[in-house]
Each structure stands twice: as C-alpha cells, then as structure tokens.
Image: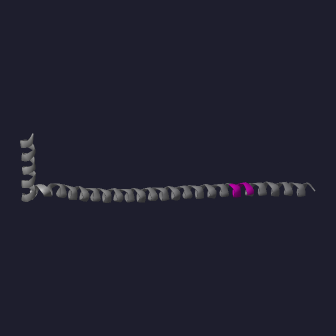
C-alpha cells in the first residue's frame, strides 16, 4: 500500500513538473509572439509615417510650383503694360497732365 501511495505522489509531482514546464513554454511563446507583433506594429507605423511624410512633401512641392507659376504669371502681367510703347506714352502723358494741372 505504501508503494502505491508513493507511486501516486511521484506521478503527481511529475505531472506538476510537466504542467509547470508546459506553462513556462507557453509563456515564452506568448512573449515571443507579442514581441514579434510589437515589431510588426512599429514597422507598419514607421511605413505609414514615411508614406505620409513623402505625400506631404510632394503636396508642398506641388503647391510651391503652383505658387511660383502664379507669381511668375502675375509679374509678367504687371510688367507688360510698361513694356508696351503706346501704354508707356499714355501713362507719361497722364502724369504730365496731372502735374501741369496741379
């Protein structure tokens, strides 16, 4: 009878040890999986930030090109009357008549 009880106690100890080892292995697998998921999340976040920064830079570059084109067109339009001899002559005559009236 003592041998049977000793065998039961030994089996219980072995089972407890096996269960503890299995739990530890599961904890390690879960920790490794969590670590891998965190790394994947960080990579995805970095990719999203990089893509958004590139898109933002491209948008700013396009806006700058548009602003430069509008500025150039405005400057050309604003300088054009002064390069036309007829308009320049008319402006000079208007200035002279205003000065003579005053």
Q: What residue sits 9% from the left and 54% below the top?
A: 90
x, y percentage for residue 56? 38, 56
Q: Quadrant of the N terminus?
A: bottom right
Relative to residue 78, is residue 26 drawn left or right? right
39 relative position to 78: left or right: right
Foreground residue among 29 and 86:
86
The image position of residue 86, as x and y in percent, is: 7, 59
Residue 76: image quadrant is bottom left
The residue nearer to you, when weighing 47 against 56, is 56
Image coordinates for residue 80, horizontal then vertical, percent:
14, 58
The C terminus lies in quadrant: top left
**In the image: residue 69, left or right of residue 80:** right
Q: How many marks?
A: 0
* Vertical relation: 21 (above or below) 97: below
Residue name at image x 42 percent, y 58 percent: 52
21 in magenta: yes
Picture residue at 48% right of the left edge, 56% below the top: 45
- Choose between 45 and 24: the one closer to the eye: 45
Find out whether residue 71 is within the magenta segment: no
Q: Quadrant of residue 35?
A: bottom right
State whether the magenta stretch is mostly helix, strand or loop.
helix
Instruction: Give the farthest residue toward the right.
Output: 1
- Residue 38 falls in image quadrant: bottom right
Residue 15 at x, y percent in the picture = 78, 57
The stretch of residues the image draws in magenta is 19-23
* Residue in view at x 27 percent, y 59 percent: 65
């Amino acid at each position: 009878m003592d041998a049977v009880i000793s065998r039961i106690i030994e089996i219980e100890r072995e089972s407890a040890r096996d269960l503890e080892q299995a739990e530890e292995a599961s904890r390690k697998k879960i920790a490794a999986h969590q670590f891998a998921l965190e790394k994947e999340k960080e990579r995805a976040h970095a990719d999203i930030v990089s893509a958004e920064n590139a898109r933002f830079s491209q948008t700013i570059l396009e806006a700058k090109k548009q602003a430069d084109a509008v500025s150039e067109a405005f400057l050309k339009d604003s300088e054009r009357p002064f390069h036309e001899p007829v308009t320049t002559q008319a402006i000079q005559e208007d200035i002279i008549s205003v000065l003579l009236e005053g």
